[in-house]
Amino acid sequence: MADAPQTPRTRRTREELRALLIGAGRSILEEEGLSIGAGTLTFKRVFEHVEATTGVRLTNASVIRRVWENQVDYQMDVLVAVASTAESAGEIAATSRALAPLLGQADLSSPTGRMWTLREMARVGGEAGIRARLETRDWSLWVGVWVLALTTDPVDDRRHLREALAAGLDAAADVWEQLLAAICAHLGLRVRAPLTLRHYTAAISAMVEGSALRQGGDPDLALVVRPTSRDGGPQEWTYFGICLEALALRFLEIDPDWVPEPAA
Amino acid sequence: MMEAGLALLADQGLGVGAGDLTFKRVFDRVESATGVRLSNASVIRRVWENQADFQDAVLMAVALAGDAGDEGGAAADALLALLGSIDRSTPQGRLRGLSEMCRVGGAASLQALVDSRSWSLWVGVWVLGVTGTPSERVDRLRQALLDGYEAATERWMGLHGTMVGALGLRMREPFTLRQLTVSVGALVEGCALRGGTEHEAAVILRPTGPGGAVQEWTLFAVGLEALAHQYLEPDPGWTGSADGV
């Protein structure tokens, strides 16, 4: 190892020391990442939780070398479980519930009516989706695990974590894609070539995640009032709904060959 | 056991922090980088009360740096280089220029963000701030995050405002420049979070070049173009003033 450069011994001020050590600490974190994990999730605490909630008493002998090699192995398994649930089913359900009445009442008689319904879905679905996202702690846990995978070298366990995250994202995207395909079919819309429904799904998901990061902390994200009701009256929009509308208009267009299904 | 573990994490959050950042490791780093030798006596009760206090100070520094990472400079360089080649003589030309700026600037800024270690650190600290059990320490961290976020948003608004003016565009009523900036920031961070997955990373070929020539787009740039056209429109009163950009 090369000799470190020598400097004369001087007594540094409090401020100089502070700047020196904060800079060094920051460099180490940039190289190695934050210590994010489930380190506080000890077997002891989990056993106590299990006993308090189910009455089942467990000991180390119940699980070590039987279920997991050790506590670290168990903690990684829990993180992988978090990683696999990219988006909560609750969010999809909340959005679907908010959109169902709109689809039922949609004016399908003209391209104008169909496009208006698309915009209204962005407004209503956007509000429901972002609220559901923010109300669940699953999401913040998921972001934490994602940062863990993102900021550390992809070796062994961490690679496993990244694979679980990717699989979780894909599974969630499949569900969202089916929902969006159904909406497009109902409203007589199609994706603008060469974009695909998967691109659209991915763009919406990215918008949701970035917005949820901000919505948790930006106090200035007030509602925007726009003259967008069917008769030009004012309606309240979240900024996320405005973004969803923008994506819908960029990715989707009227399908000229679409014929509405006859009423049952 | 898995259910219990997930319930505990949901209740108390992930352990996020700088726990591995011991004084010993930082002193070693300082000595190898600068030759300065430090000991606990140099800092404890002089600069920080203890090691945990120091770790908090580092997290606060990350929080105050904001979420912009290093991508602001990369995007500005890419956009300024492009501006001279844009036909700004007609509203159509300016809107085409806006799309091209989204394509080129979007690719540059997303890549810079994905490559930025400081951004991923910032997201980690944000998670701690948002999910941490309320305490005086977490409150201070939250305030630092908000301060850093605000400063970064102001910087981005400056860049966006310059580009909007240079292209002879204006905000559509009732939108504000801040809403555009926050929307773009949300999209780029969402894309960066998902950056490792196949669909976000894939290049999209669109016939958007001169004469319908095919050009490469990232998914983020397509979304950015959507946001730009949502929030902006040609300024009919624009006279192509020499703004120096």
Image: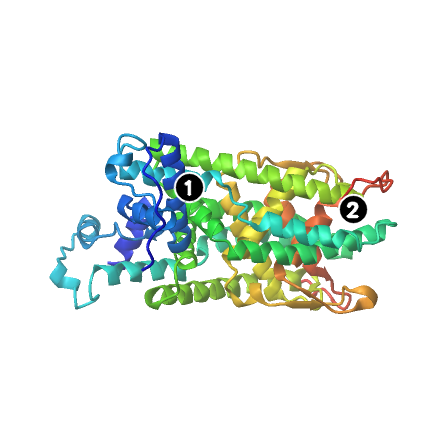
Amino acid type of the residue tagged 1 in the rendering? Val
Q: Nearer the viewer, residue A159 or B20?
A: B20
Q: Nearer the viewer, residue B177 or B22?
A: B22
Task: Name which residue type carries label 2.
Answer: Leu
Crowding at dot 2, Cα within 10 Å, few <14 / some 14-19 / many 20+, comes out as many
Closer to the N terminus: mark 2 or mark 1? 1
CA gap, disc 2 to disc 1?
38 Å
> Which residue carries the number 2 mark?
B167
Against A59, residue A125 (above or below) is: above
- Looking at the image, residue A78 sits to the left or right of residue B232; the answer is left
- Residue B137 percent coordinates (x, y): 35, 34
Count of numbered circles in the view? 2
Residue bearing the label numbered 1: B130
| Numbered disc 1: secondary structure | helix
Residue B132 is drawn in which quadrant?
Answer: top left
Q: Is residue B16 among the parts visible in the rendering?
A: no
Q: Position of residue B235 (x, y in %)?
A: 82, 41
At x 63% / y 67%, what residue is drawn? B203
Residues indicated by labels 2 and 1 sit on the same polypeptide chain: yes
**Letter of the chain that mark 2 sits on in the rendering:** B
- Write the residue at 37% across / 55% down: A32
* Residues under numbered marks 2 and 1 in contact, where contact means CB atoms less than 8 Å apart: no
Q: Secondary structure at mark 2?
A: loop
* Residue B60 relative to residue B23: left or right: right
- Image quarter of the N terminus of chain B: bottom left
Residue A182, picture quadrant? bottom right
Report the chain holding disc 1.
B
- Whether residue B124 appears in this view of the structure is yes
The C terminus of chain B sits in image quarter: top right
